[in-house]
Image: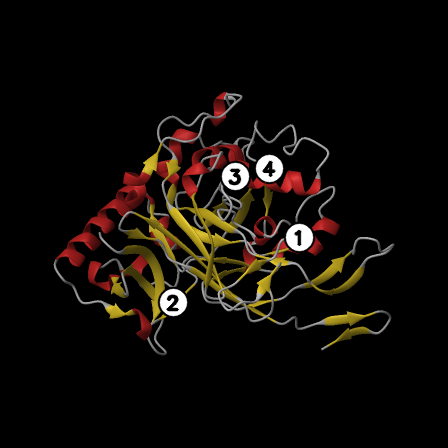
Amino acid sequence: MIGAVGFGVFSEGFGRPRVGFRIGDGVLDLSAVGRDDVFAQATLNAFMALGRPAWESVLGRVAHLAASGADVLPLEDVTVHLPFEVADYVDFYSSLEHATNLGRLFRPDAEPLLPNWRHLPVGYHGRAGTIVPSGTPIVRPCGQAKVPGEVTPSFGPSRRLDFELELGFVVGVPSRLGDPVRADAFREHVFGVVLVNDWSARDIQAWEYQPLGPFLGKSFATSMSAWVTPLALLEPFLVAPPKQDPRPLPYLRAEGNWALDLELEVELSGTVVSRTNARGLYWSMPQQLAHATVNGASIQAGDLFASGTISGPERGSEGSLIELTWNGESPIRLGDGTMRSFLEDGDEVVLRGRAGDLTLGEVRGTILPARVSYSAGNGPAR
């Protein structure tokens, strides 16, 4: 389907949210397909849990309706919502280039990659309750940070707020607690993919992350597309993945083509600042799912797994400002002549993805000023 974007949830006026399929700049109301038990719902969760045969049947019906010129609702006339109730959220660190860049930034006199990185997909458990759909404004977070040279930390709005260009996949069919999900079972469990912006407060993160990793520097907000692109539509764009050395352990071996040839770009306040491609990710989506469940952890409909920042090897292909500006040392110039080291209030970030004629739902977010600040000894001030 040329111009297809994916399944989502929309409403008209004061009407109840329901399921639709976005094609270009229009939304096909899936009430035409029937199944009120799933398509009259305010989330995709019930539909996603039906499994692959149902997904493919509905997708075929959608393709037929689109080809026959079925009426669609103009996108500007509807309100879009979070497409599914996020049951759980895991964020990985799957880009070799991104991991290497950050290693060089923070460990300049040591090997950029830590010893485990090439042996397993490193990840952290995020906060599902703060995932928001595209278009939701992002309030600048406050927290503790320690300025280099200062003896003690201070509290206040983050001064090093960043975006992260990521690709996420969404679980439909659950698994049973205690049973790992094999890499070759990926298609049977995963419904589709979305673009993800894992907003990051780098100053808060730098102070808190040792020894347990990201916490408040990440948990304040994560933005995702309002439309989930079915995995079935992306099959023609799966290509051979990068070579992995050393060879992964048996449970991480995903046979076949699992790198997604997806062109990506980041626009910051009207200027495209990064272009890259998801096909360069070192750890594939089936490997991420297999690793997340190898200990017997179960998955459920609505689980979201994100790739971590996607960066390429060339300048201008980095998926975050901390890399594009080399931790603020080399600010970038925007089209209006202003410079950026990190995000400023009022900045709008837009993530886009395209595979051939297929467009993924964009992710858009504007930075709002911090709402709460603390001055030493005076408690909260609003």
Q: Looking at this view, is 367 or 1 the one in front? A: 367
Is residue 123 placed above or below 330 in the rendered structure? above
Q: Amino acid at mark 1?
A: Glu
Secondary structure state at the residue bearing disc 1: loop
Q: Which residue is mark 4?
A: 100
Residue 350 coordinates in the image, percent (x, y): 46, 61
Sooner in the amino-acid sequence: mark 2 or mark 1 = 2
The circle on residue 329 is 1
The amino acid type of the residue labelled 4 equals Thr
Of marks 2 and 1, the one in the foreground: 1
Image-quadrant location for residue 118: top right
Mark nearer the viewer, 4 or 3: 4
Q: Earlier in the sequence, mark 4 or mark 3?
A: 3
Left or right for 53, reference 351 = left
Image quadrant where one finds the C terminus: bottom right
Residue annotated with mark 3 = 95
Numbered tag placed on residue 80 in the rendering = 2
* Location of residue 117 in the rendering, given as x and y in whole percent from the top left corner: 60, 31
Q: Is residue 52 above or below residue 367?
A: above
| Disc 2 residue crowd, few under 14, some 14–19, many 20+, Cα 10 Å | many
